[in-house]
Every structure is written in structure tokens, then in C-alpha cells.
Image: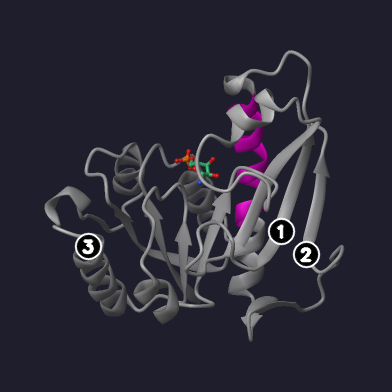
Amino acid sequence: MKSIVVLVSGSGSNLQAIIDNCNIKYINAEIKCVISNNPGAYALQRANSANIDNIAINHKDYLSRDEFDNELIRILDDLSPDLIVLAGFMRILTEKLTKKFIGKIINIHPSLLPKYPGLNTHQEVIKNRDIIHGVSIHYVTSELDCGPLIAQGEIKTKTFDDINSLVDRIHKIEHLMYPEIIKYICEDKISLNSNQVKFKNIKTKDYIIYNKYEI
Ligand code: GRF
């Protein structure tokens, strides 16, 4: 069985979806540990309730990004997971860390990348009156929100959408897609090879998994 470490900073609804799907064995993996840079993250309470080891390393206790990442690398080396899942982890990782764990770290981002890397994606969608919005799941490289894409999920925006309704609908598809992709990775059906995502027996569209949702 594969082992997973989940990195979080906030509410952890994606973490919860991963926990639930491990519990029902949809994902054949064990969450070894949940790590947060924010000691107050509700995600840590979710880990506690599920009896999952969890660690808070407050980035404010470190003088530099490098020092924080060195500690994170030390912990990750110790845990030696098969997969590191960023689930609302709001820290930019240093190249040292991303290079060390290349092919082992994935992230979920609330936009159809390459549109809107970084923060405030829903605001951008509303401001630009985009007719579609969505989520992207990708391998993590040193460039923020730019690693090789694994999957995207698309929704149509509605005229009455505001930030809350978009957050809500985007979360719904995240909770479906992230567990699905983690399941495939844990079954060795998705991997990263020479910076290219390889799929085994999975239907893709233009080399990524692309789902359209009516939500
Ligand atoms: C999600 O929308 C994810 O795409 C982004 O941060 C949010 C985390 O939400 N990276 P939650 O903490 O999992 O509820």
C-alpha cells in the first residue's frame, strides 16, 4: 500500500475528501501524516479526528524560506512517502525541495491553468466575465502553478455567480477529481517521466484527463 503525506494551510476540505476516500478504500493508500505551516489550520483538526499523525511547522518561526523548507525536507525525508499531496498549501516551495521530490508532489489549483496562476482566481474569472472556470491538478515543479498538467475539470459559469458560489462549485469538483487522480497515481497508472505525464489505461484528451461538469 502506498503512503501519502498531505500538506495543508487552511480548512482542509480536500484533505477530508482524501481521508474519506482512503477510508472506503477507493484510494488504496495510507495517509502517514498531515503537515501544516499554519498551526491554526482547521485541516489539523480534521487529521486529529481521523487519528492521522499531524505536524504544524509554523513558517513564522523560521528566518527564511530556505530554513523553513530545510525543516520540511527533513520531515519529509523521515516520513519517506510515495506521494506528497498539496491540498490548499499556501506556501511557495523552494527549488531545492521541488527538485528533490520531483515526480512525487502534486498540487490542485482552482483555475484552468495556464490561466490565473497564483491567488484570487475566482475574482479574475468574475472580473473577466469568463464563461468557463475550473480546476487543474499538476505535478509540482519550481515554477509556481506551472508543472506538467495531469487533469482539468471544467464548469460553466452562471450569470449570478459570485465568489462564494464559485468557491462552492469548484470545491465540489475538486473533491471528486483529486481523490480520483490520487487513486490512479497510487495504482501506478499516472507517473511523471522526463517531465512528461504518462497515463496507463486511462482515457485522456490532448494528453491530460479533461472532465466537464454540470454543477
Ligand atoms: C482549494 O480550492 C485548492 O484548489 C486551493 O486551495 C483550496 C483549498 O481548500 N489550492 P481546502 O483547504 O481544501 O478546503
Residue 58 visible in the snapshot: no
Residue nearest the observer in this picture, 199 or 60: 60
Q: Secondary structure at mark 3?
A: helix
Q: Identify the residue shown where x is 43% and y is 72%.
A: 98
Look at mark 1 in the image and give the residue it sits on: 151
Left or right: residue 76 versus residue 102 is left
Per the model, the C-alpha gap separating discs 1 and 2 is 5 Å
Q: Earlier in the sequence, mark 3 or mark 1?
A: 3
Residue 8 visible in the snapshot: yes
Residue 208 image label: 2
Look at mark 3 in the image and give the residue it sits on: 68
Quarter holding the C terminus is top right
Report the amino acid beneath label 3.
Answer: Phe
Assess disc 3: are there few (<14), some (14-19) or many (≥20) residues with their C-alpha within 10 Å of its C-alpha. many
Q: Earlier in the sequence, mark 1 or mark 2?
A: 1
Report the amino acid beneath label 2.
Answer: Ile
Q: Secondary structure at mark 1?
A: strand
Is 25 inside the magenta-drawn segment?
A: no
Q: Position of residue 31 (x, y in %)?
A: 41, 63
Assess disc 1: are there few (<14), some (14-19) or many (≥20) residues with their C-alpha within 10 Å of its C-alpha. many
Range shown magenta: 166-179
Task: Give yes or no for contact between labels 1 and 2 (Cβ–Cβ under 8 Å).
Answer: yes
Q: Position of residue 37 (x, y in %)?
A: 27, 51
Task: Give yes or no for contact between labels 3 and 1 (Cβ–Cβ under 8 Å).
Answer: no
